[in-house]
Image: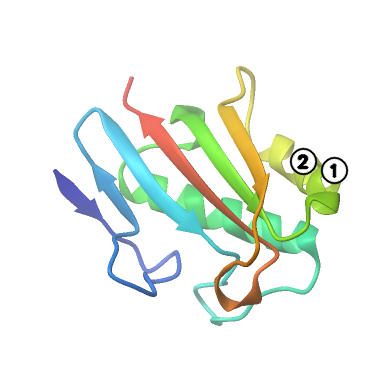
Amino acid sequence: MKVVSTQNAPAAIGPYSQALDTGSMVFVSGQIPVDPATGKMADTVEEQAAQSLSNLKNILAEAGLSMCNVIKTVVFLADLSDFAAVNAVYEKAFTAPFPARSCVQVAGIPKGAKLEIECIAVRP
């Protein structure tokens, strides 16, 4: 197993890896919408969704993969009423066939983020 790490996504804020590569699959930890260049988060849920997806994309790129390799995502929302807004941004990040997905509302997300997204990707 190989640890995947890039400066193009926020560093882990706890005892975990940005991603682990098993050779056939890459498991990417949940990405909150922190801009790795500034350490800040945007205000709107749409901007936050775009940043979290960008962080996923950058970690996958470090592993030699793209969003096309993603087979499963989990979206954690602080407020489920943001579902439609996040979905509009999310659907632009992927092409058909879209990954399997779960989306749940949670009581809280680190750093007060409005969402967090994790994924699993496979090698062809």
The residue closer to the viewer here, 97 or 103, is 103
Task: Tell me if 114 is positioned left or right of 5 in this view.
Answer: right
Q: Amino acid at mark 2?
A: Asn
**For the residue labelled by badge 1, is the local secondary structure a helix, a strand or a loop?**
helix
Residue 100 picture quarter: top right
Q: Which mark is residue 84?
A: 1
Horizontal and vertical percent position of residue 89: 75, 45
Q: Does residue 93 sit above or below 110 in this rendering?
A: above
Circles 1 and 2: CB atoms closer than 8 Å: yes
The residues tagged by marks 1 and 2 sit, at their Cα atoms, a distance apart of: 5 Å
Which residue shows up at 16% across the image and 48% down it? 2
Which residue shows up at 77% across the image and 41% down it? 87
Task: Tell me if 61 is positioned left or right of 80 in this view.
Answer: left
Quickly name the residue at label 2: 87
Which residue shows up at 50% across the image and 29% down it? 68
Count neighbours of disc 1 (C-alpha within 10 A) and say few if under 14, some if 14 to 19, many if 20 or more.
few
The residue closer to the viewer here, 55 or 45, is 45
